[in-house]
Amino acid sequence: MTTTAEPTAGAEVGRARVRKEDARLITGRTRWTDNITLNGLLHIAMVRSPVAHARITGIDVEAARQLPGVVAVYTGADLDAEQSGIPCAWPINTADTPPRHVSIATDTVRFAGEIVAVVVARDAASAKDATEAVEVDYDPLEPVLDMEAALAEGSTLVHSDHGSNTWAFFPFDSVAAGATSGPTADEAIAAAEADPDAVVVTRRWRQQRLIPAFMEPRSVVVDPTTEQLTVWSSTQVPHVLRTMLGLTLGLPEHKLRVIAPDVGGGFGGKLQLTPEEILTVLVARRLARPVKWTETRSESLVSGHHGRDQIQDITVAARKDGSVTALKIELIADMGAYFGLFTPAIPIFGAFIGPAIYKFPSYLFTCTDVFTTKTPTDAYRGAGRPEVTFAVERIMDELAVELGRDPMDLRQQNWITNTEFPFTNAGGLTYDSGNYEAATAKAMELFDYAGLRLEQERRRQSGDPVQLGIGISTYTEMCGLAPSRLLGALGAGAGGWEHAAIRMLPTGKVEVVTGSSAHGQGHETAWSQIAADQLGVPFEDIEVLHGDTQVSPKGMDTYGSRSLPVGGTAVVKCAQRVVEKAKKVAAHLLEASEDDLEFTAGRFVVRGTDKGLAIQEVVFATFLSHNFPEGVEPSLDSEYTFDPENFSFPHGTHLAAMEVDTDTGRVTLRDYVCVDDVGAVVNPLIVDGQVHGGLAQGIAQALFEEAVYDEQGTLVTGTFVDYTIPSAADLPSFTTERTETPATTNPLGVKGVGEAGTIASTPAIVNGVLDAIRHLGVTQVEMPCTPQRVWRAIQDARGHATQETPIDTHSPGAGLGSIDPNNPQGEVQ
Amino acid sequence: MAQVRVTVDGVHYADDVEPRMLLVYYLRERLGKTGTVVGCDTSNCGACTVHLDGRSVKSCSVLTVQADGAEVTTIEGIARDGRLHPMQEAFHACHALQCGYCTPGMIMQAIDLLGDNPDPDEHEIRKGIEGNLCRCTGYQNIVRAVQSAAQAMKPGAHADTHARVPVAGGGN
């Protein structure tokens, strides 16, 4: 355990500072990648496959080449020798070589949206026009769309050279891993099945496919005319991108500069090395001209990686007194057609956190990774943890129903109490701190849990057509990716450290350089607050630099709620190094012993005297170096690379009051209360904002969003008309509160907050929907819980036949707000 | 090519444009008004919202030639005398933006909303900005910002509800 930093007077950490970065964003002085224009800039447009699975039998680009403004047209045959394959940094299955992920198809396309030709023109419109003139002949192959069918013997293969659509089978058995002793989960479940005083509950759920849908479409600009080849990309991971471009294309890393300028959101969707980045680099090098590619929204939805998409088989065993004895999570996870950087590992992130806040004495997690002819999946906000959190928080509700218990009461019976920390869960993770009782008590009071239960009962008694449901989610998650040694032991191709550097400028101003590359999270403000406290300099005197490998050469970037617990800690440690160096200089200048100096509020003071120097004075004296201690380097600038010793574990209690109109299926989120414990808070304004946005995305999974493919493997939710991310009118205001149990594994006591809302809210909403209509006999509604699905579930429970419509088949989740569920397609049930 | 005369953020322009050129691309590529951005290709997201003769429009759904003779105001033209517009201030003070990509369009739409309804309740605000999508904020602080700006912009209200932030580089 490390000690927690002493709070200083007038502390910046904890203040609701409005953000520095807003100044440019609210005035339009922004630096989005697509804003960049260079002399002689050429523009790329991609020709993409309209079919999911086919052999390419011919491509004719001659007509396109003749069009005005067109500079070049390339096919896979032209670029294959240089394109290499997009690497997978965490393959899970180490016995086999991952199928080659080409940036541009050569002979076969494996998802609708895959690039088959690249058009380069003098302006974007001419490039786009010319894509229409590229003739591609496809010999169709059977699409592989259903995960279970893909696993079956004799299925068409997505990658014939792999010999199977199964990529990996990953098991985690708590007994084999030494996380629990006694019976295995399978043994405990078998024993419970034979025991009249025990129950076993098994459910199958679908985690639908989602699309990150960041607001800024991806864009890449490459300038090959500079000494270092410069790549601007709308990416979350400029440092990873630089290293990966070097490794993949064989470019010397020191001849590459990657810049992530203003980046308009990511949510995991820009945690990637993309085909488009590779192709833009290759084209720019070939033509020796600067080149830009900017996607359309439709391109983004079909070709940017997707998230989630799992079939979940969940089993819980418990004694009839409510105490749980086993949890089994069996996942089938859709990889899509190829691997991105982390595709096969995403569902595995959930393996260790599956037991959540509960004391399961046995636990089994398995995941089968399967290929289909769909857009590749990879990280999306939460990445593996929302999926298992949904599984465990939903099954706890199902168990409560089975046992006739209040679902919160059952959770309390089984969770880790606040005196039991540190606690090693059945997934082998050691939770350093937490207080589930405190967060839950606060949430239940704010929510008026007891009062809403009474209202629910009244409505049931009166047969109100609008029924009330209460949804609960008492989640925890693992943040702060990640201890490097642990990542190594799990087979990841990277560490989990983060880097910071501090430059003390002669006039006392400060540059804080971070390897954590923000794209909306407010690092410039929060890092300034942290450094201001540590160095005792004004907030306004600090500039935070990031996102350019020439300025910030070292970093592991932003994802997995890691920036603050890992990158923020690096800033703290780095600042402490600056102070240590300054102390030597101050002692020399004050003719005092270092031991007699105190550093508070930016001043070195000789203890017991009024003799002292401000840090700015020490900085200037160091700049002059005229009067300097013997053998000491005349610089206070410092660096620190922090590698966490453990993950951090935010937790909280989320409660949703859901109203369901039983006549129409319409679902209304009436009230949402969450109390999150994300540890110490650097900036409550930013933390609340992260929770709000996280909630919106988690609620959207429960109620609104789904990436739907038709039977040919075409994405039919390929625009914002069909892929229905929520608008302001779809959401209420949330009540967000906090409890603070500091993390003990970093000096700030912080845990991370970027994903909490998304992870927690999805099961709360679905539990609430079911709680509203379970008394009608409904036991399941698949996500997203659209009016049509809810209405059908109620009709089915009432024994009324409903008729499938084309909308059920093609677009079950999308755009149903305007369809009268009582009269879909004019049919009468 | 078609000739257009248009006033953008107080500056007069006369240009020859392709008849098919959308206003948003004219603003971004011809005039360098890159504060206005493109977020979709189906006019759903509202990131490109500007004012055309004082009313909000999605500039991806307006041809440049349709703006002939009109006055266009973008996010870059709403500050006055080096001071931010109250809506910009409110977005800053209420933390109504994270990545900031939707922000210019959202601010332009919110100003238009208050033009129609100077004192909207939460429901009216949410309906009024329904055509502008944000993926970061969950809209909660955007709603607060619009409420705050509405107070600041009330006739007789002192607009300095929040500490005014000078605009670097000056406004128009």
Image (cartoon, helix red, strand yellow):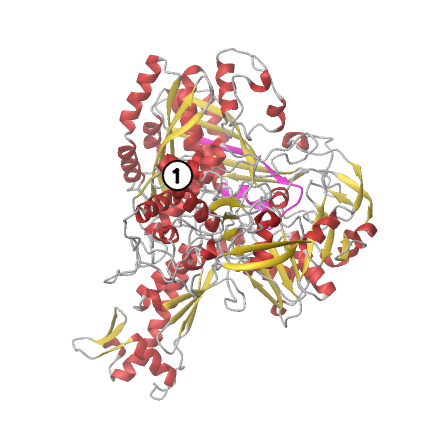
Q: How many marks?
A: 1
> Which residue is most to the top?
A799
Task: Tell me which corner region of the image, top left, top right, bottom left or bottom right, holds residue A259.
Answer: bottom right
Q: Is residue A524 left or right of residue A147?
A: left
- Magenta span of residues: A326-351
Give the residue displayed 59% in from the left and 41% down from the top: B42
- Residue A341 is inside the magenta segment: yes
Q: Residue A815: x, y in percent?
A: 55, 30
**Quick one: A94 or A61, which is closer to the camera?**
A61
**Quick one: A556 or A466, which is closer to the camera?**
A466
Q: Residue B66: x, y in percent?
A: 59, 47
Determine which residue is flagged by label 1: B125
- Residue A633 is inside the magenta segment: no
**Quick one: A38 or B111, which is closer to the camera?**
B111
Instruction: Note whether residue A507 is visible.
Output: yes
Q: Chain of mark 1?
A: B
Q: Is residue A822 left or right of residue A79?
A: left
**Quick one: A433 or A606, which is closer to the camera?**
A606
Q: Residue A333: x, y in percent?
A: 58, 37
Figure check: A3 above or below A817? below
> Which residue is most to the front?
B69
Figure check: A667 above or below A510? above
Task: Tell me which corner region of the image, top left, top right, bottom left or bottom right, holds residue A450.
Answer: top left
Amino acid at the residue labelled 1: Ile
